[in-house]
Image (spheres, rainbow, N blue to C red):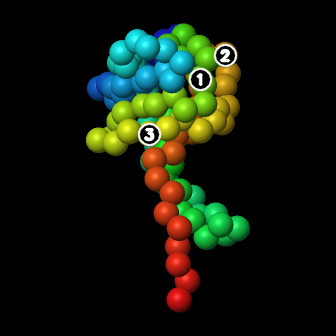
Amino acid sequence: MSADLSVFFNPEEFAEEIAYTRINSASSPMAIMADVEYGRNYNETTDAVDVLATVRVKCSEVPAPAAYDRATFGGYEWVYDSVLSGDGLTWAMQFRRDRRVLFKR
């Protein structure tokens, strides 16, 4: 499995470098390798569109994600939202960048 992770988190394959900042730490952002998938979500209840990203990272690099952690990638700062899944080796984390309310005419 570790051989698979070395390919998955290789910048020449799937990964890109992101800057991860822990909200409960005074330290500088950490440069970590991650696989990023961008998306949008329409919420019918609130008539809002969320700009989201699913970010897969190694658990060893982000052992305890916390609310309001931040990451910079794709030219924007993103706010940590939740862990979508984890297998002990990696986290699939959801980040949110923007929420836009739609106005119906």
45 versus 105 height, above or below:
above
Image disc number at residue 88 = 2
Q: Quadrant of the N terminus?
A: top right
Tell me the residue that label 3 is attached to: 78
- Quick one: label 3, few (<14), some, or many (20+) residues within 10 Å? many
Disc 2 is placed on an element classified as loop
Tell me the residue that label 1 is attached to: 65
The residue lying at 46 percent from left, 53 percent from top is: 98
Q: Amino acid at mark 1?
A: Pro
Foreground residue among 58 and 66: 66
Question: Farthest residue in the right direction?
Answer: 45
Foreground residue among 26 and 11: 26
Q: Amino acid at mark 3?
A: Trp
The residue lying at 66 percent from left, 16 percent from top is: 88
Eye-nearest disc, 3 or 2: 3
89 versus 14 height, above or below:
above
Whether residue 36 sits left or right of residue 92 in the image: it is left
Q: Amino acid at mark 2?
A: Gly
76 versus 98 height, above or below:
above
- Quick one: label 2, few (<14), some, or many (20+) residues within 10 Å? few
The residue lying at 53 percent from left, 78 percent from top is: 103
Disc 1 is placed on an element classified as loop
Camera sees residue 8: yes
